[in-house]
Amino acid sequence: MAVREATTDDVDAIREVARRSWEQDYPDVLSRESIREGVGEWYSPELVRDSIVWSQALLLVADRDDEVVGFAHAIWEPDDESAHGEGGEGHLLRVYVDPAHRGEGIGGQLLETTVDRLFDRGVDRVKSMVLEENDLGNKFYQSFGFERESTEEISIGDERYTECTYVVRPD
């Protein structure tokens, strides 16, 4: 398996991994309508393409035998006070692995590679968010040294949920 930067040829595969992941992970948390609306809004072809080409976004895919089996999506904001554009904050927006390929270390490899690349770009902390009811997701971030920083209410479709924010800093 290889972790590589996504290309525009990967848009449909990324969207499919997202859809299957949401359907697997959230049936007891989100309604079917919220899943459909969330995937449609957050993973529209235009938004996925924009994330691939935007200079302050990083979209990595896990590729096994020419099949995208997972992805990680991050953005970063340089610290405006830094004279050299260093510092600032990275946001790990998503790490998803196709349910058929879970338990193989793919998510961890995507997370570690993404965080390392953000730190290489000079950010001094990386934040990630996960729904509070997603026990597996919360444990995943904690197992990689992320510490819970806060919670807030968010909307997905017409429903409200609590989202946890985690943060990690370079060693």
Image: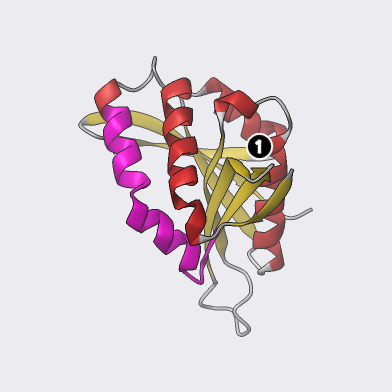
Left or right: 145, with 138 as reference point: right
Could you tell me residue 39's position as x and y percent?
35, 38
Residue 112 lies in the magenta stretch: no
- Is residue 160 shown to the viewer in this render? no
Could you tell me residue 155's position as x and y percent?
28, 36
Query: How many numbered discs, if any?
Result: 1
Residue 53 lies in the magenta stretch: yes
Amino acid marked by disc 1: Gly
Q: Which residue is mark 1?
A: 107
- Is residue 38 shown to the viewer in this render? yes
Give the residue at x 34% y 57%: 46
Q: Is 76 located above or below residue 100 in the figure?
A: below
Q: Nearer the viewer, residue 24 or 9?
A: 9
Q: Which type of secondary structure does the marked residue at label 1 adopt? A: helix
Q: Which quadrant, please, contains the N terminus?
A: top right
Number of other residues with Cα within 10 Å of mark 1, as a class: few under 14, some 14 to 19, many 20 or more: many
The image quarter in which residue 145 lies: top right
Residue found farthest to the front: 65
Could you tell me residue 45's position as x and y percent?
35, 52
Residues drawn in magenta:
34-58
Could you tell me residue 92's position as x and y percent?
55, 50
